[in-house]
Structures are given as structure tokens and as C-alpha cells.
Image (spheres, rainbow, N blue to C red):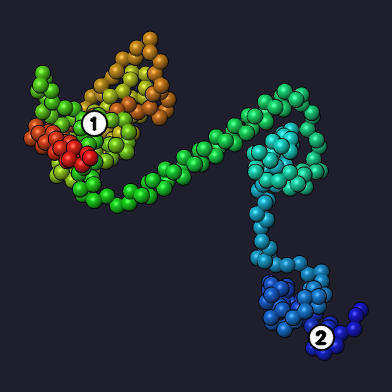
């Protein structure tokens, strides 16, 4: 054993204390500071053979990538394909999978098709992430909605989607139809802002005959916060066998119809509000 002098002369005693501290769960830095050992070589000798406590072991940031690379390699992927999929270097991939069997060679045409497909899938994933980020940033830009914000949004929303009076058919009533849950929520918040009592609202579902009618009624009742027994009889739309419908599947729930009883006066105000908005917008035009 090397000869130590000065404050490290009692090496064995110092090692005994260092080992005790290590087994008590202290880190190298804590042991160094506690024993005043400022020489890394001597600290290494003092702790030789003693494993670090679990809490000091940092997880490898590439562990997940390595596991995924090995999984893909076992599926027969080439280095190029794994690199496109995971975005890491070939040298890292080689290090991670070098003990695994090489995949069978494919003909060049098949390899080209597979590489092209992998690049396209990667591009789609990048685009999806860009879409998600753009939408998230835009959502944050809205912030809190004032009463006037909600009022203006509600007027525009009703005039776009609500029932309107026609010169050839006098219908001064307030009726709104939509299939978008978010639109329905904004519309109800707007009616509440206008002071329309819930007791004046009537609910009805319009849906194709091939859909889950009962499930749709339950969905809309839960969304608007009323018992499904409050819903009027469902309007069933017959399916035209000559048309190919795309609004199918478990997420198709038809449309919700919301009517306001004794709504003639409210309708006239909505039409007036909309006319005022059009005038105000025209005045802003350069």
C-alpha cells in the first residue's frame, strides 16, 4: 500500500469512517466535506469497493431511446430506419444493439419503400406536433373572456347557426342547433348572460336512425346538466342509402336543438344586435 503522510497518515482509520458514512447513504461530496478530503485520488481509495447509494444514481436520459432502439432492431429495422424514427445518431444505435442479431437483408426496392414510408411517418409526426403547439399558443392568447366578449361572440354565433326570420315565413323564435359541444357551452353561457332562465329552455336531439339514440340523449343531457327525462321526443333523420355518411361511429351523437320559450322579443333584439355589428364593422373598413 502507498505511504500516506500528514492528515492522511491514519489511512485505515480514515477509510473506516469514509465507509461508514457511505453505508449511511452519504454522497461523495458529503463525505469529502465531512472528512475534509480534498484529493479525489485519495477519496477514490477510501471508497474503493463501496457502491454509491441509490439516491445518488442519476437515470440515463437515453435509457428509453436505447430500449426502443433494441425493440425496433429485434423487429428487423435497419440503422437508417431506427435513426429516422428516434432521431439519434447511428453510433449510439450501433452501441445499443451490437449484441443483437442482424436483420435479414431486404431487396433494394423494398428498403427504399420502407425508408420512404418511415420518412413520411416522421414528417406527419412533426406536423402533428406543430399543429398541437400552434393551437395551444392560440388558446393561451384568448385569456379571460369579458361579458362584452361573450356577448359579441354569442350574437355572431346565433346569427351563424340559429333559426332566423324570413320575409316569406315569419319565425320570430329563438332556436339553436349544433353538434359541437364547445359551441353549445358558449351558447348556453351567452343565454345565461342575457338573463334567459333555464326554465324557458327546451331540449331535443336530432340524429340519424342508425345511430345510438339513447346514448346520444344521455350525452347531451349530461353536457347541459339536465335529466334526460327533460328532453323532448328525438327527431330521427332517415338514412338515404344513396349517400355515404361520414358522421358515423361511437363519437357521432347527432345535434342538440335548444329552443327558448316566448322568445320573439329576444329574437328581435338578436337581429338588431347583429345589424348593429354589421354597421360597426363597415365603419372600420378603410
Left or right of residue 248, residue 260 in this image: left
Quadrant of res 21 = bottom right
Disc with the residue nearer the chain's start (1 vs 2):
2
Query: At x 30% / y 34%, what residue is drawn?
Result: 220
Left or right of residue 21, residue 239 in this image: left
The spot of residue 98 in percent (x, y) is: 80, 43
* Mark carried by residue 8: 2
Dot 1 crowding, Cα within 10 Å, few <14, some 14–19, many 20+:
few
Asked if residue 176 shows in the view, the reply is no
Asked if residue 265 shows in the view, the reply is yes
Q: Dots 1 and 2: beta carbons under 8 Å?
A: no
Left or right of residue 122, residue 177 in this image: left
* Mark carried by residue 105: none
* Mark carried by residue 160: 1
Which quarter of the image is occupied by the N terminus?
Answer: bottom right
Query: At x 64% / y 39%, what residue is drawn?
Result: 85
Amino acid at each position: 500500500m502507498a505511504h500516506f503522510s500528514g492528515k492522511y497518515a491514519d489511512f485505515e482509520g480514515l477509510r473506516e469512517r469514509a465507509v461508514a458514512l457511505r453505508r449511511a447513504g452519504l454522497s461523495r461530496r458529503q463525505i469529502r466535506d465531512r472528512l475534509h478530503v480534498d484529493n479525489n485520488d485519495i477519496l477514490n481509495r477510501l471508497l474503493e469497493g463501496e457502491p454509491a447509494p441509490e439516491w445518488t444514481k442519476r437515470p440515463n436520459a437515453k435509457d428509453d431511446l436505447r430500449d426502443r432502439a433494441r425493440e425496433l432492431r429485434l423487429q428487423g429495422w435497419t440503422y437508417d430506419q431506427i435513426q429516422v424514427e428516434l432521431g439519434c445518431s447511428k453510433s449510439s444505435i450501433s452501441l445499443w444493439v451490437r449484441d443483437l442479431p442482424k436483420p435479414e437483408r431486404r431487396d433494394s426496392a423494398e428498403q427504399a419503400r420502407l425508408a420512404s414510408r418511415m420518412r413520411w411517418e416522421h414528417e406527419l409526426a412533426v406536423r402533428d406536433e406543430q399543429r398541437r403547439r400552434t393551437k395551444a399558443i392560440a388558446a393561451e392568447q384568448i385569456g379571460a373572456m369579458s361579458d362584452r366578449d361573450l356577448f359579441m361572440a354569442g350574437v355572431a354565433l346565433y346569427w351563424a347557426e340559429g333559426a332566423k326570420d324570413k320575409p316569406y315565413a315569419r319565425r320570430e323564435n329563438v332556436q339553436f342547433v349544433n353538434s359541437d359541444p364547445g359551441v353549445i357551452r358558449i351558447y348556453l353561457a351567452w343565454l345565461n348572460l342575457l338573463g334567459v332562465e333555464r326554465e324557458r329552455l327546451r331540449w331535443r336531439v336530432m340524429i340519424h336512425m342508425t345511430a345510438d339514440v339513447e346514448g346520444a340523449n344521455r350525452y347531451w343531457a349530461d353536457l347541459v346538466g339536465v335529466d334526460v327525462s327533460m328532453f323532448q321526443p328525438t327527431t330521427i333523420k332517415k338514412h338515404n342509402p344513396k349517400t355515404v355518411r361520414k358522421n358515423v361511429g361511437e363519437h357521432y351523437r347527432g345535434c342538440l336543438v335548444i329552443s327558448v320559450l316566448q322568445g320573439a322579443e329576444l329574437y328581435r333584439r338578436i337581429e338588431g344586435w347583429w345589424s348593429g355589428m354589421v354597421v360597426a364593422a363597415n365603419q372600420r373598413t378603410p
